[in-house]
Image (spheres, rainbow, N blue to C red):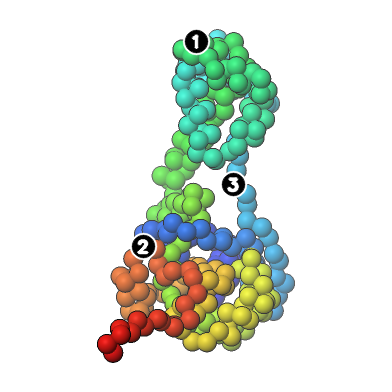
Amino acid sequence: MNLNMAALLSSSVTDAAASEGVSSADGQLPVLNSFIMASSTSTNGLLAVARPPAIEILSGDDDDEEEFDEENPQWAKWNCQQIRTKIRNFLGTKEMMQTAFLKLCDINSNSYYRFMNLKGPFGGCDNQTYEGAAIFFYRRKKKQEEEKAKLKAMKPNERKRKATEEKEKKDGTVPVYDDCDEVRKKINYFLGEKTVTKAAFLRALGDVNSNSLRSFMNMKRGAGSGAANVVYRTVYVFFEKKRILEGGKKTKKRLDNEAKQGRNGFPLRHDNGMRWVIVGKGM
């Protein structure tokens, strides 16, 4: 099998679902926080482990002295009340904590609280918070516009990949549409091909250790047997990316599972197959 391991393991975790329009579930799934980069010349080549890039935080670029017009700086298009609203809305998203925001904008906490307690379009125009935050939002807006322009210039498949990466940053979740037995079957087949070692496979899955894998694989047969094990949901994502990158089609069983389980996919809780039966007195 000609498996492009580097492409598989460096792609976005939710490419598997989002790139095909599958909505994410509400439950949080662990993202693959380690990736294997396999040698293109040999399956026994050196495997290097790398962390995925952290979400980029806009920097101040203090050396950009000519960025703004001194008499009519672009960031001054917002008044003080608009900046207060922008700050509240931005911090409300939890994209960045207040302490990090103040540090990035070079604002001290006393000035910040004074500014936020003022009112009106001109209340606080001489406060350092106004200029620092306004410049932050100006640069942020400019960066977003540049990203949109780049996205528009991309090829359709590259645009889809970028969109799914952004989706991953927002929620990091993906519904599971293979039952536990199917995932165990895929693991056995994949490791049996000797494309990578079991140790390398575990490193690619990030928060999965050999004990968890052994426990999952040794569970008795059953669609929900092992669903609470981290191996189940993490390995499912791995094989979904593999299927999409290789252009594989969804099986009939997979399509049936999607229709039956809905947007949330299979429940991530253990099901040993046992059921309670209530027997009436007259029986």
Residue with the most extreme left position: 282
Residue 170 in percent (x, y) is at: 49, 49
Q: Please give the name of the residue rendered at 44% of the width and 83% of the height, measured from the top-left corner.
A: 274
Q: Which mark is residue 122?
A: 1
Residue with the most extreme front position: 281
Mark 1 or mark 3: whose residue is earlier in sequence: 3
Can residue 104 be seen in the rendering of this structure?
no
Residue 21: quadrant of the picture? bottom left
Residue that label 3 marks:
55
Can residue 105 be seen in the rendering of this structure?
yes
27 sits left or right of 60 in the view: left
Height in image: 143 above or below 22?
above
Between tags 3 and 2, which lies in front?
2
Residue 177: quadrant of the picture? bottom left
Residue 71 in percent (x, y) is at: 55, 10
Residue 208 in percent (x, y) is at: 63, 70
Mark 2: amino acid = Arg
The answer for how far apart the CA atoms under marks 1 and 3 are is 34 Å
**Figure label count:** 3
Secondary structure of residue under mark 1? loop
Assign the C terminus to one quadrant of the image: bottom left
Residue with the most extreme bottom position: 283
The answer for how far apart the CA atoms under marks 3 and 2 are is 27 Å
Residue that label 2 marks:
263
Mark 2 or mark 1: whose residue is earlier in sequence: 1
Query: Label 2: how many residues lie within 10 Å, few (<14), some (14-19) or many (20+)?
Result: some
The answer for how far apart the CA atoms under marks 2 and 1 are is 48 Å
